[in-house]
Amino acid sequence: MISETAPADVRLAWITRQEIALIDLREEDPFAKDHPLFASQLPLSRLELEILDRVPRRDTKIVLYDNGEGLVARAAERLARLGYSAVTALAGGLEGWRRAGLELFQDVNSASKAFGELVESRRHTPSVPAPDAKALIETEPNLVVLDARRFEEYQTMSIPRGVSVPGAELVLRAREIAPDPSTTIIVNCAGRTRSIIGAQSLINAGLPNKVYALRNGTIGWTLAGQDLEHGRDGRFPQTSPDRETEARQSARAVSYRAGVKHIDPRGLDILGRDAGRTLYRFDVRTPEEYAAGHIPGFRSAPGGQLVQETDVFAPVRGARIVLADDKGARADMSASWLAQMGWEVYVLNGGFDRDLERGPRRPTRPALPDVPSLTAAELIAGGGDLIVIDVATSAQHRKGHVPGAWFAVRASLAQALIVLPEGLDIVFTSPDGDLARLAAADFAPLTRQRVSALAGGTAAWIAAGGPLETGLPKAATFVDDIYRRPYEGTDNAAEAMQAYLDWEYGLVDQLARDGAHGFYVI
């Protein structure tokens, strides 16, 4: 029997800044409909593959919950096998939280989005509505548009004249892009949060320019009936040494006002030896810079996305965070926001003169189960006599999968028994093959058929010359692993986009009702 933690005790831990990880085990779509403010969505489907990085200290207090789906007991058993020793269940699950009269939030990254709304309400961040922004873009030559999203999002859809400057890069790069103080700067994202945080970052850092957030981002632009551009490749330029120094100094002043502490590598070693506290180490530079050389033990977390997706990167509320950046400004600005969000955050001075690791960092993963395997060549030779089940995300499956493969959510594999043809052997695949091995181990006891995993996953299939099929023609389970974001893509219904904006506008009042966030705004 799993011990329980009352909802009121979880809330008290947040208020008193005790370390605690509240984990929602459901898939992303149901999570986005209702969850507590600081809950982190870590689905049972991917639990073993993500938990070691996201909750690195094995004696962290972890509180698990679902909404009656029966996921908690399975998750607790898996965590116990991995050595987690302080795992409890949320008393009453999600419904218990609701019955306790506590607030439930919607969408994803809701804590960061609520914080962004609080910043705008407290600082009155200047914004410009889409029709006025369009008029300025068409008539004002002395204007720049800085897109604060990830480059991939920018390429999908962007504002005319927009340049990709992901959030943490803004203070570092803006003076280079707009050296004339009379140049007007418009910062945009898809919705509201990164526009607000990005514009306010420039204001906090003392840029003399007129700075505006694009009110409601590309959603507002679309709802105004204005056309977006697609496939643009406008990237920020390199920053000159003088501009970099200026950015570093102004960002350091902002982080000082926010109460951010600075440490050297010796201080980092001391923090790292504190076995009683969780320590997250994040490199907030671009992914390309990270791959070219990073401090060992640091994970890539570009600063703008770290502030936007803190619940994903750092599920342990109350943990310590150390940020690394060889140019300084990105770490200081990111840290200034994390501090205002209630985190104990440090900026590392130096550390890049030591031996650096190169390439992307492989996630920390446990030993995977020993299951029968099939090579890509064997699957190509005998695919007609096999059932292939792909446990990639539905988004990955739609982009390309082994022809004829069924899609399935790993946590719901028992559903697949109802729809899969009988009498054929089964092979699981996933992008790199790791999740496929876990799924094969789960499914083998449920059937008499031979169950195996594709060695190397779909990547090995592609490398062997196997063709790909797109779309999602066959689903063996419910397709609830991805929440359809109203602010991403180009084919969202106007009603969904407007409903999303209405929800964001209500977040400040919801924060006040919740009362446990601990946010402040400098």
Image: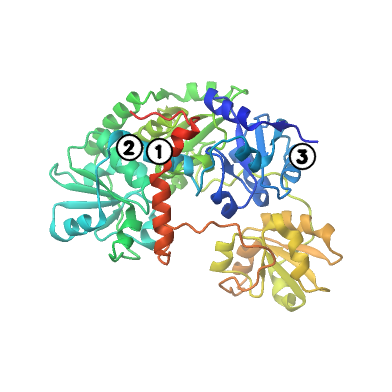
- Helix, strand or loop at mark 3: helix
Q: Determine the residue positioned at 39% across, 28% down.
A: 520
Q: Determine the residue positioned at 36% across, 37% down.
A: 330
Badge 3 or badge 1: first in the primary sequence: 3
Residue 470 versus residue 371: which sits nearer the camera? 470
Badge 3 or badge 2: first in the primary sequence: 3
Q: Which residue is mark 3?
A: 81
Q: Which residue is mark 1?
A: 508
The image shows residue 448 at horizontal and vertical percentages of 87, 65
Looking at the picture, does residue 420 appear above or below residue 92?
A: below
Badge 1 or badge 2: first in the primary sequence: 2
Q: Mark 3 to mark 2: distance in Å?
A: 46 Å
Q: Place residue 353 in its image quadrant.
A: top left
Q: Which residue is mark 2?
A: 121
In the picture as drawn, the residue positioned furthest to the bottom comes out as: 384
Instruction: Find out whether the residues at labels 1 and 2 contact each other: C-beta distance under 8 Å.
Output: yes
* Residue 300 falls left or right of residue 229: right
Q: Amino acid at mark 1?
A: Val
Q: Determine the residue positioned at 56% across, 72% down.
A: 471
Please say whether residue 284 is visible from this viewpoint.
no
Q: Mark 3 to mark 1: distance in Å?
A: 41 Å
The image shows residue 349 at horizontal and vertical percentages of 40, 27
Label 1 environment density (alpha carbons within 10 Å; few <14, some 14–19, many ≥20): some
Label 2 environment density (alpha carbons within 10 Å; few <14, some 14–19, many ≥20): few
Q: Quadrant location of the C terminus?
A: top left
